[in-house]
Amino acid sequence: MTTMNLIQLSEFINSNKELFTNMDTSVIQKYIDFAKKYKGYYYVGGQVKLSPEDIITVEHINQAKKINETAVIGHQMDYYGLVISKKELTDLEKIWNVITNV
């Protein structure tokens, strides 16, 4: 199954924990929590705005990677935010690679 939204992805991970034993899947819950707090949206890799009901695609991941690679750092908080976003994006990409191979 390769077309999932954030909620479906969370449910898939919880139902198939053995597939994700060696990776950090907390990014999914972080995105869900963020969307609950901030008007129903979260940002893939800190860049691409989606709702939890939107299907996550490889294009979203690639778009966020491209934006992060060319980000201009203005001050320390920009740097810190970018570091967190890149880590979350890396974790999401690992999860994506697992679900696309199931």
Image: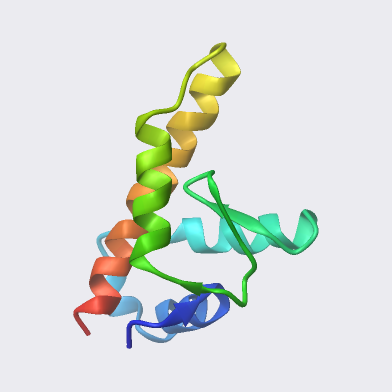
- Residue at 49% across, 17% down: 73
Task: Give coordinates of residue 98: x percent, y percent.
Answer: 25, 72
- Is 95 placed left or right of 27 in the picture? left
Between 8 and 67, the residue placed more toward the observer is 67
Q: Is residue 45 above or below residue 55?
A: above
- Farthest left residue? 101
- Is 18 placed left or right of 56 in the picture? left
- Residue at 53% across, 45% down: 47
Task: Give coordinates of residue 64: x percent, y percent.
Answer: 43, 47
Does residue 52 appear anywhere in the picture? yes
Q: Which quarter shows the C terminus?
A: bottom left
Task: Give coordinates of residue 38: x percent, y percent.
Answer: 77, 54
- Farthest top residue? 75
Q: Which quarter shows the N terminus?
A: bottom left
Does residue 19 appear anywhere in the picture? no
Task: Give coordinates of residue 18: x percent, y percent.
Answer: 28, 78
Between 89 and 64, the residue placed more toward the observer is 64
- Residue at 43% across, 30% down: 83
Q: Is residue 39 above or below residue 16?
A: above
- Residue at 36% across, 44% down: 65
Q: Quadrant of residue 24?
A: bottom left
